Image (spheres, grey):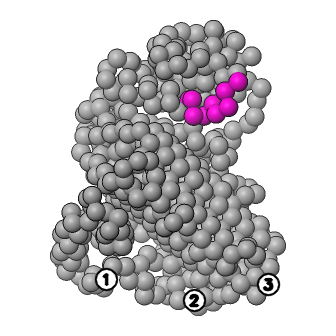
């Protein structure tokens, strides 16, 4: 059971931890590993267009012996999960073929991979030890729980998705008869959601809007894409531990939303003020109880025990948060505690910092942010979101494939090879209504072929710095697999770009 009666700390503005630029950083041991494989984060998703982050794959195959992360801090948390090893160059290398994931502790792990078609008929519970990709929609009354990441390449309707790592839903998440539920130990990224409960151990990124949703994230919640010309929150409760940024809040058609900054809810029966030994014993005991409840509820009778099952998942999420706090782990990213609205904030909207609450008495049409100063919530002019250092703006071009390759690669690939981000150049997309769906099918089949060993994916490196620049395939191999799937192939690269 989740206990929401927890006050905001009085010294929330004075941690004494700042970086070289004077920005606040969270206390705790930050990780020392930086991923080398392409993987988008919610902060990156927020500064890219809503379509750009769709081209990133959350769950992807990493072959054995490939470098997946490098050390970029001298001090911090150097622990990593199973399936990985440190080589002589102080890099993390995959021992076996698998999927790289970040677990609820923020640590790099390597997990097994499972794929499934769309889940519409015969609702049931799927429990996966590793990561899972759903190549389609997830229909009502389905329950998916994975220890790694979960990627859904369709919509989610009245379903439950639980991941020890992150969740990416490329379509919409809706609740028609009953609400949907997404629980993640790390990040959650969705296109838009309605009548949905979202619990994230780290950050949440929503491309378009949240309608009557209850969303809680220990880190940041970003709705829309900068310069925040889109992104709507209507109704519901949106609770972030650090920062909440969106374009517009409130609507005349629904109840005003509550925008909240504050500590995460505690777990009932766990004393957060006890010593570490007592808290560890309490966590272990509650963990055993949750395991027993899941064993009883996850089965053919899931729909009959839906309330108990959802409560068990909420408790499991709370345990993930407390475990990270107990180990004093941090993501190391600077942050500010604020609610930033870059468009309009409707009359009646609530802004809450722990136990302090303000009701907006009139429509606010200028960019504004709310911060806690002492025991008062004050309004300031909104400061724009900071662009992550590793994100390069995407500029439109008449030849996007060629321009992206020129910026991304220090060398030009031979015509017999194609970069994984330029697979579209192999296909004949004339007359195709949903190019993205076709490209997703091809990417999925390439990953499966690689896992079977019938296809090789080659690492591309900068010849001067040795930094990885993604991967490439033989163009003939890609064309062969596409043809076998019934996908039209362009006669040559020049014809595909013209």
Q: Check disc 3 and report its element: helix, strand or loop.
A: loop
Residue ID at (21%, 63%): 295
Residue in the foreground of this view, choosing between 373 and 174: 174
Q: Earlier in the sequence, mark 3 or mark 2?
A: 2
Cα separation, mark 3 vs mark 2, equals 19 Å
- Disc 3 designates what residue? 362
Given this view, does label 3 or label 2 mark the residue nearer the observer?
3
In percent of width and height, residue 407 lies at 64, 28
Q: Position of residue 272 (x, y in %)?
A: 31, 82
Label 1 belongs to which residue?
268
Q: How many marks?
A: 3
Give left or right: position of 245 versus 464.
right
Vertical comparison of 170 with 252: above or below: above
- Above or below, comparing residue 298 to residue 344 in the picture: above
For marks 1 and 3, the one nearer the N-term is 1
Disc 1 to disc 3: CB gap under 8 Å: no
Query: Residue, x 57% and y 89% (percent of image)?
Result: 356
Q: Is residue 304 left or right of residue 283?
A: right
Residue 493 is drawn in which quadrant?
top right
Q: Secondary structure at mark 1?
A: loop
Under circle 2, the secondary element is strand
Asked if 401 appears above or below 163 in the picture, the reply is above
- The residue carrying mark 2 is 356
Give coordinates of residue 177: x percent, y percent: 51, 66
Q: Which image quarter: residue 223?
A: bottom right
- In the rendering, at what x and y percent does residue 43 appear? 57, 54
Q: Which residues are magenta?
A: 431-439
- What separation in Å lies between label 1 and label 3 (alpha carbons)? 38 Å
């Amino acid at each position: 059971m989740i206990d929401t009666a927890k006050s905001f700390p009085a010294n929330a503005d004075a941690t004494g931890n700042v970086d070289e630029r004077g920005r606040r950083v969270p206390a705790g041991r930050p990780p020392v590993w930086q991923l080398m494989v392409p993987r988008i984060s919610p902060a990156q998703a927020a500064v890219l267009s809503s379509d750009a982050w769709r081209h990133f794959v959350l769950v992807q195959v990493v072959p054995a012996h490939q470098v997946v992360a490098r050390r970029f801090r001298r001090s911090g948390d150097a622990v990593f999960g199973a399936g990985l090893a440190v080589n002589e160059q102080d890099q993390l290398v995959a021992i076996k073929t698998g999927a790289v994931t970040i677990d609820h502790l923020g640590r790099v792990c390597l997990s097994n991979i499972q794929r499934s078609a769309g889940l519409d008929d015969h609702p049931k519970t799927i429990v996966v030890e590793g990561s899972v990709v759903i190549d389609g929609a997830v229909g009502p009354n389905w329950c998916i729980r994975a220890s790694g990441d979960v990627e859904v390449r369709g919509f989610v309707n009245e379903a439950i998705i639980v991941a020890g790592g992150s969740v990416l839903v490329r379509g919409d998440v809706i609740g028609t008869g009953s609400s949907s539920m997404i629980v993640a130990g790390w990040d959650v990224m969705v296109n838009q959601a309605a009548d949905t409960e979202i619990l994230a151990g780290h950050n949440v990124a929503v491309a378009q809007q949240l309608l009557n949703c209850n969303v809680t994230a220990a880190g940041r919640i970003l709705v829309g894409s900068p310069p925040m010309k889109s992104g709507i929150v209507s109704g519901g409760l949106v609770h972030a531990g650090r920062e909440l940024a969106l374009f517009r809040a409130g609507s005349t058609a629904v109840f005003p939303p509550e925008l909240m900054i504050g500590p995460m809810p505690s777990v009932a029966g766990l004393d957060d003020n006890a010593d570490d030994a007592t808290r560890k014993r309490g966590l272990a005991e509650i963990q055993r109880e949750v395991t027993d409840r899941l064993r009883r509820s996850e089965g053919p009778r899931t729909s009959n025990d839906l309330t108990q099952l959802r409560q068990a998942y909420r408790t499991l999420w709370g345990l993930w948060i407390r475990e990270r706090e107990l180990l004093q782990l941090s993501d190391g990213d600077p942050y500010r505690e604020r609610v930033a609205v870059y468009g309009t904030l409707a009359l009646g909207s609530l802004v809450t910092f722990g136990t302090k609450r303000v009701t907006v008495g009139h429509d606010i049409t200028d960019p504004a942010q709310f911060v806690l100063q002492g025991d008062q919530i004050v309004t300031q002019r909104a400061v724009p979101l900071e662009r992550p250092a590793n994100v390069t703006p995407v500029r439109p071009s008449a030849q996007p494939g060629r321009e992206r390759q020129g910026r991304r690669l220090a060398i030009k690939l031979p015509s017999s090879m194609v970069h994984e981000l330029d697979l579209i150049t192999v296909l004949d997309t004339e007359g195709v209504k949903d190019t993205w769906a076709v490209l997703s099918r091809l990417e999925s089949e390439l990953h499966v072929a690689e896992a079977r060993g019938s296809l090789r994916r080659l690492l591309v490196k900068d010849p001067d710095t040795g930094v990885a620049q993604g991967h490439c395939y033989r163009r003939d191999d890609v064309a062969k697999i596409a043809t076998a799937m019934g996908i039209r192939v362009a006669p040559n690269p020049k014809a595909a770009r013209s």
